[in-house]
Image (spheres, rainbow, N blue to C red):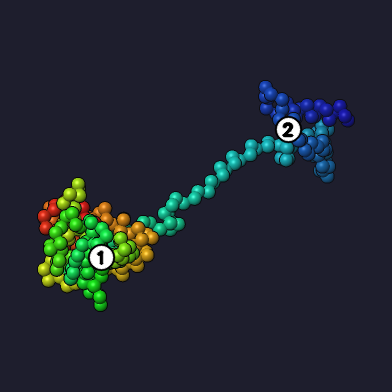
Amino acid sequence: MMATARMAFASCARLLPSSPKPLALARTRASAVSFLAPPPSSSPAARSTRNPALLCSCSTSSSPEAAVAPPPPQAAAVEETKPAPGEGGAEKAEPAVEELAGLLDIRVGRVVKAWRHPEADTLYVEEVDVGEEQPRTICSGLVNFLPLEQLQDSNVIVLANLKPRNMRGIKSNGMLMAASDAAHENVELLTPPEGSVPGERVWFGLEDEKDRQSEPASPNQIQKKKIWESVQPHLRTTDNCVAVLGEHTMRTSAGAVFCKSLQGARVS
């Protein structure tokens, strides 16, 4: 019986494909190798033709060890990226120069009185009407550029929301705006057009943009945020001596602000 089984198993092995390598049975487990006789039949014909040889049934089934597939490629770790400054609203963008200029309180003024500073050779002291109950006292370093009589009763442009400064014992509450050449050898006051009213706020832009002005910042905000220092480098005069911020004309309700003769000059 055992000899017959070994012959049947050898017959099954010959049916397997040949390979130069050892059979994969080394890694797969043969299961259900059975040596079963065919079921008995009640038919006499079947009994007479029954093959005494045992039926060899060889089947393989998968097992945890069979045909181990390589592990799937590990997904690359997605590195968490942080948004750059300014992306996703993390940081607010810097305001435009035009927006900063809208925070300046620039007004039409009129010099009602002017005299030499008693303690400073280069300073004038002016009382300037800027539309308030009392004139403002302002000190200006214009002695080397303008005669006193030219300053007296003149219409001027005043930056009114600077923090007050003590200048040789006199508190200055504002600044007269002027144009100067690159060498700072020639200086001319900015002048509002005829018909401008003291106290009117000046703006930059078109004639119909007056009502779009924002509220002026406080003197503390002007100093803390360096608003004037950010705006001033963008101020100049054109070839027609008109004061501009970039390409935006400096205006009152009566027209454009200008200087007497300086072209392409810086404004401060």
Q: Hey, which quadrant is residue 29 in on the image?
A: top right
Specify which label sits upstream in the sequence, 2 or 1. Answer: 2
- Residue 144 appearing in the image: yes
Q: Nearer the viewer, residue 262 or 240?
A: 262
Q: Amino acid at mark 1?
A: Ile
Q: Position of residue 36 (x, y in %)?
A: 82, 38
The crowd level at tag 1 (other Cα within 10 Å; few <14, some 14-19, many 20+) is: many
Give left or right: position of 54 versus 207. Answer: right
Q: Position of residue 96 (x, y in %)?
A: 31, 58
Give left or right: position of 65 versus 235. Answer: right
Q: Hey, which quadrant is residue 222 in on the image?
A: bottom left
Q: Nearer the viewer, residue 57 or 197?
A: 197
Q: Amino acid at mark 2?
A: Arg
- Vertical placement of 58 versus 156: above or below? above
**Quarter of the image with the N terminus in it:** top right
Real-space Cα separation, disc 2 to disc 1, in angstroms: 100 Å
Q: Hey, which quadrant is residue 70 in on the image?
A: top right
Which residue is identified by label 2? 27
Give left or right: position of 110 versus 229. Answer: left
Residue at coordinates 53% horizontally, 46% vertically from top-left?
A: 79
Q: Check if mark 2's residue and mark 1's residue have beta carbons within 8 Å.
A: no
Label drawn at residue 138: 1
- Vertical placement of 247 versus 38: above or below? below
Farthest residue toward the right? 1
Q: Position of residue 67 (x, y in %)?
A: 68, 36
**Quarter of the image with the C terminus in it:** bottom left
